[in-house]
Image: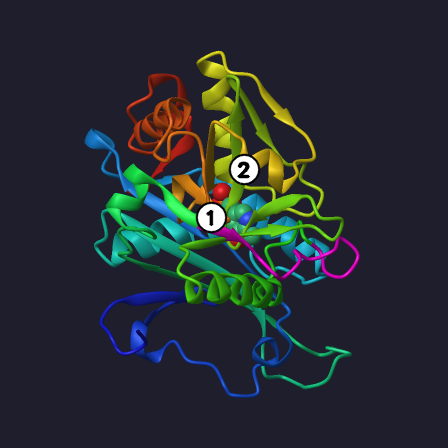
Amino acid sequence: FADRDGVIWFDGEMVPWRDARVHVLTHTLHYGMGVFEGVRAYHAGDKGSCIFKLQEHTDRLFRSAHIMRMEMPYSKEELNEAQRAVVRENNLDEAYLRPMAFLGSEGMGLRADALKTHVIVAAWNWPSYMSPEAKENGIKIRTSSYTRHHVNITMCKAKANGNYINSMLALREALDSGCEEALLLDNEGYVAEGSGENFFMVRDGIIYTPELTSCLDGITRKTIFQLAEDCGYEIREKRITRDEVYVADEAFFTGTAAEVLPIREYDGRIIGEGKRGPVTTILQDLYFKAVKGELPAHTDWLAPVK
Ligand code: PMP
């Protein structure tokens, strides 16, 4: 993945992809203190390539840095432009973007003094996180044996590098047992989120999603709130138990990478009809329209790269 053509924005400059290197004593590599984003650009008709909810992602990156007490050396405007520039300069039309702020190799130790925060933005073509069949037919998931981070162990509102070892353990376990994704419960046993997605379920026409307590404040989650409101669905944020999900009519995940992903089976129980449900279908369709600039009411969600 490192040995390829293209450019990466690295500390204010466009660097050839192959040369965007760091030292083995890079602090974040040792202790995981870093913050990042996952952002997508879509082809939006006449507008060309557009980054979806660019400002929201940049705002969350800065909030994550603030929580982690990392000093961001660039302004939000500079990082917005860096994100547009990597899509443009890599000649990408649809892309996944990865902005990340990390601590450098200026020193070692948990005190983390005298360290500089470095920032990169990479972008590449990453068509689909899950197979096209998964988007249509839904995925099979299981309860993770790993608990989602407790709010006082790590900071769940920060999209922080180190947080993702929990996600990776959960996903690996799910894949090993023949599932496609994990559903993580919080430390009290209530549904939290997927390894990289927020969770929703539908019962009797009402949409439910866990409160944000130990979940990431997902940007796709918020988009779904708006799209659901547009078509008159009620969304309730509440504590959800795993057996409520077993008897839900529909369930789905949301995330920038995963987009809107139906869940057809959970812990060996078929959910609803065992396929993408009607509410999920409507919201998924609206989501794909939104990112492609086909919803006139929400074109302000798109930031053209040109
Ligand atoms: N939860 C976790 C743990 C995630 O990593 C992600 C992906 N960023 C999400 C939820 C979904 O967030 P978003 O919709 O902003 O991509």
The picture places residue 1, in percent across and down from the top left corner, at 30, 73
Which residue is denoted by mark 2 in the rendering?
246
Please say if 251 is above or below 166.
Answer: above
Dot 1 amino acid type: Gly
The picture places residue 39, in percent across and down from the top left corner, at 42, 49
Q: Main secondary structure of the magenta part?
A: loop
Q: Residue at x 34, y 34 (%)?
A: 275
Dot 1 alpha-carbon crowd within 10 angstroms: few under 14, some 14 to 19, many 20 or more? few
Instruction: Name the image quarter holding the C terminus.
Output: top left
Q: Is residue 62 in sight in this rendering?
A: yes
Residue sitting at the far top: 232
Q: Which mark is residue 268?
A: 1
Residue 239 among magenta residues: no
Q: Nearer the viewer, residue 244 or 92?
A: 244
Q: Which mark is residue 285?
A: none
Dot 2 alpha-carbon crowd within 10 angstroms: few under 14, some 14 to 19, many 20 or more? some
Q: Residue at x 65, y 57 (%)?
A: 65
Q: For the magenta stretch, what is the residue range?
A: 141-155
The number of numbered badges drawn on the structure is 2
Dot 2 amino acid type: Tyr
Mark 1 to mark 2: distance in Å?
Answer: 9 Å
Q: Nearer the viewer, residue 190 or 3?
A: 190
